[in-house]
Amino acid sequence: MSDDPQNELSALEAAFGQEVEQAADEDALYAVQVKYLGKKGLVSRMRSHMGKLAPEQRKSFGQAYNKTKTALEGVLAARGEALAQAHRAKRLAQREDLTMLPRRRSGGSLHPITHTRRRLEAVFRQMGFDIVDGPHVEHEKYNFDDLNIQAEHPARDMQDTFFTKGRPGSDADPLVLRTHTSPVQIRSMLTRRPPVRLVAPGTVFRRDDDATHSPMFHQIEGLCIDKGVGMADLKATLYRFVSAFFGTELQVRLRPSFFPFVEPGAEFDMQCPFCGGDGCSVCQRVGWIELGGSGMVHPAVLEAVNLDPEVYTGWAFGFGIDRMAMLLYGVPDLRLLFEGDVRFLEQFPC
Amino acid sequence: MLISRTWLEELLIDPQGGSLPGDDELGDAITSLGLEIEATTRYGEGLEVIIVGEVRSKSPHPKADRLGVVELFDGKETITVVCGAPNVPEPGGKVAFAPVGATLPGGLTLTAREVRGVKSHGMICSEQELEIGTDHDGILVLPSQWSAGERLVDLVPGIVDTVFEVGITPNRPDALGHVGVARDLAVKLQRMLTVPPLAEPKLPPLPDLVTLEAPERCGRYYGFAFEGAHVKASPLATRVRLHRLGLRAINNVVDITNLVLMEWGQPLHAFDRGKLAEGRVVVRLAKAAEPMTTLDEQSIELRDEDLVIADAQEPVALAGVMGGLESGVTTGSVALLLEAAWFSPTEVRRTARHHGYQTDSSYRFERGVDYGPGLARAASRALGLIEKLTGARCIGRQVVEGTLPPVPRIVLRPDRVRMVLGMQVEDSECESILVGLGVEVDASDAAAWVCRPPSHRPDLTREEDLIEEVMRIHGLDELPAEPTMPTAHWESAATGLHEPAGNLSRLQQDDLVDAFAAQGLHEMVGLAFANPEKLARVHGADGIPEPVALTNPMRGGGDVLRTHLLPGMLDAGALNVARHGRSVRLFEVGRIYRWGDPVGGEGPTSAIDQQLPHEAVRAAILLVASRAGDDREPVEGRAAAGILLDALQYLGLSGSLAPAAPDEKGLAHLHPGIRATVQVGGVQVGSFGAVHPDLVEAWEIPEELAVIYGELAVDALPAPTPADFVALPRFPATNRDLSLDLAVEIPAADVVAALSDAAAQTDDASAEDPARLSAGDRGREPIQVVEDYRGKGVEEGRRALLLRLAYRAQQRSVTDTEVQALHDRIVQGALERLRTRDAAAQPR
């Protein structure tokens, strides 16, 4: 070690420069930094010479020390920056083909009926409708009689009904598998007072089996009871609903028809959402798609649930969820819905 | 109901002399009346060129025995035609001739062609070839007074026709005849309904002709007696008309009753009076077990509640349903008795259903035919036609009356019409619509009209029915889509999300469905029907729990409602394996049904709902390994455990696994050695495992494929509560692994339970001292089973179970020494518990 601390500083600076150049990565650089500039580093230790120097030398040494230290820090920073740049360049040089067969978690799916039902429920919920359901095995009273479908009347034949055998050992009346969601109207009106506004999606059963009929299928029923409700409200609701459901303005039209539990009764059609009413293969070129039945709740039905038809009126409508799902997804055969082939099911991811 | 356009044209005369609108527009008008057109068929295209040909001579074909050569005069010239029919008339007779160039309905275009050396210039046609009848035994022979060269379509207008197939709803019996449809159209299109002229002869009464013994079942009965009838084939125009409407021509008398049926919707019946004992009829109830043979040669045994038409001795017709075989009108009949009646609809329906009939007649009677003017008109119409077409003479009649339905008196308020319809329909329009439809309207009180519906409209009984009539005719095209009702219904909407299954709201049930789909499973919807044999297999020794049986199941569609989701899922699993062999990951959330524990809750329906079966909601999963073995994740029981526990966690429920007892009920569908249960809060809510090998075999799934099933009883799940937030740990945990040497019979869940118990005892879980060291952070960090090793280094019948416990204090670092001390105490405590079952249990 030289006697002249300033010479020693110069020597250290030179050695430092060499070692910094040799440092190949940030860790090595850090080691050099600690070796020279750490608390007890070779350069830091030089400060201890201050005390041994004559006062007149102190000033010049102090200046030399500070200058050297600043210079070393500059060299260190420059080398650090160079190393960081080199490291970054190396990382950026990495190459990988991401268009190879993607790695995916095998996704699940929801049944098209579930998708459709939820979408229907979401629209009606937003419109202020309650959502209710009822039992599948139902009293004839709620499925027929209270809905103005009297025993021994041909209207009872409009739906081919499944009857259950009574419970063994019981003399209770035989029950039916509900042929429509309309018994929920009765149940709802018995348990809540007007104003009533609800939809009842659910499973229903009819003895029928072909490409467009399944012995089990799904319907959604709408019901509104209040004072002063008329057919224009019904049409307004259907119009709002189909427009919201398909996300585009669609007209609806009503055609007189007969359903025992409504009077007046009407079928309702919507403008074909696929061609906007111009005519396409889905609507068989007529521009309209038949959706379901509707009408003003028959006064006999209101009376059956102890509502005064002079005070309250209401409307109801109903249509098939499965049919809507088939329409939405272009499924040609209803039976596909119920056989559980995963190649069908997985086409409706959640 | 088939409706003929030409027939409507005859019934609807335009005062201005215009013709009916085109087929499409006419069809739309009919549909707009609530009589929905289901199909439209046009007939007779190309038949304009068919003319009357006169036979000039006929001779055998020189080279073919079965053929003849006919010289035919077509009005201008004589033409040679080769014809194979046996019934070519003698010279002077008339036939239907299709000249060269004609295109027959079948699509054949005629050319002049040589038939075995003789050139044939056209064709002599049969009814079938012209599609105006079903007869194809020979050619159509026309009346000899027709002139050669005349067009057939001019002589028989019904040949060219459009037939609408109309869906008639059960409330409109009046529309089951052309007059009824025309009546609606007349009001809609502002035309005049013009019914055919009716015979109104002065007839002597024949008091004994009809006796009514069951007045409550027969409101009115007209009997007409005829003599001197010539029963033969009907004229061509009648036959064509019946053919167009899908009816078979039989003879002129039967055809007349059918024609009147299709015109007035009124079923009539004609008896051969010569075959009626004493030539009279009695309307009475049958005697119990009285036998009868109906027109279709069915022998039936009558009940004492069946209404019959009898002669002096025995039943000759099942009233309103079908005539008897013996008394029917046939070619030899000379004396006739014509019946026109009104029978009680309900009773006709009961009788028809009991004996298994649905006839054109019962179909109309059970819906309610006209008992008033329409009945009389239909009778007069038939009477006139019988006299005209059979040459018979009506020698007298008898009318008897029983109980007729009351005529309703309906108060109609025009303001209510407008309120219910939401349309501005003027009073004057309402009135003219109703009057046009035959309703008697007394509008002397302008705000409340008194209306009496006509006897052909039994469906009109109250105010709303009349409002619908106004709506039908006025039309719905201008109905505005404007809500008048309040747009918010808070009272009702407030309960909007609660349609619970057990403790889960409707939205939480949706969450559960999402939880399975999110784990890569595919939702299926199985039919609610099940095959009892399949169910019996699945329930095994437990037996099917009181299934709900159907009285009238679909053929091959399952006789009972499902009591388990597995059979339907195995059906789907087997179908997938057979079709493509890819792996199957299915789930279903659906109902199962059985008698017992009715669901009826509170409220007005609860009492009656005690009679309903129990409908429970189950969520089930089925995993079947891929046949190619390329599953990304192993298909094994533990996969099902993960799916079920994760689904519960998604709902906010913390599930745990527990071994199934060997005699556990309700698990017969699972492999006895590969099954376990799922619990929430110590209550069993589900089970899972490998499907029992017997079932795998029964469903013909290859043995080498893993088939895993699991289910949750959705309505047994506790109400999920929002999870409590746990402060994030600020100090690290220290893990300790523990390897235990155990008998294989001791389930891992029991080992975990033993460790948890021991931890709970050594480390009071209730103490919330943040400085306290605890295992598993008071249950928040579960004890993990890391590995289950069997094989080299482990004795046969034993396993090496590797478990991992985490130790942590909330607010300080812990030392190895204190962790080791606590760990040793917990392990010791757990071993004491485990050694009661496996004395050799020890750490490895």
Image: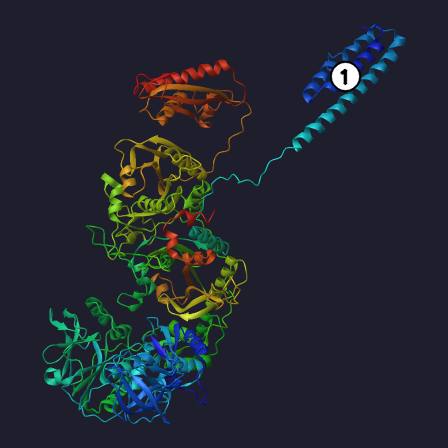
Residue placed most toward the observer, A161 or B679: A161
Query: Pointer 1: what residue?
Result: A18
Look at the picture and state if B578 lies above or below A55: below
Whole-percent x, y for residue B829 in the image? 37, 18
Residue at left offset 29%, top offset 73%: B367
The residue nearer to you, when weighing B18 against B481, is B18
Residue B507 on image: x %, y %: 44, 46
Please identify the quadrant where the C terminus of chain B is shown.
top left
B778 in relation to B670, above or below = above
Helix, strand or loop under label 1: helix
Image quadrant in which you'd find residue A96: top right
Q: Is residue B291 visible?
A: yes
Task: Decide which of A19, B26 is in the foreground and name it.
Answer: A19
How many marks do you count on the picture?
A: 1
Left or right: B266 as drawn, with respect to A336: left
- Mark 1 falls within which chain? A
Q: Type of residue at label 1?
A: Gln
Position of B126 compared to B725: left or right? left
Residue density around tag 1, few if under 14, some if 14–19, many if 20 or more, within 10 Å: few
Residue B406 placement (x, y as % from top left): 28, 77
- Image-quadrant location for residue B434: bottom left
Residue B204 spot, x, y in % from top left: 18, 92
From the viewer's side, name the closer residue of A230 and A205. A205
Query: Vertical placement of A9 versus B807: above or below?
Result: above
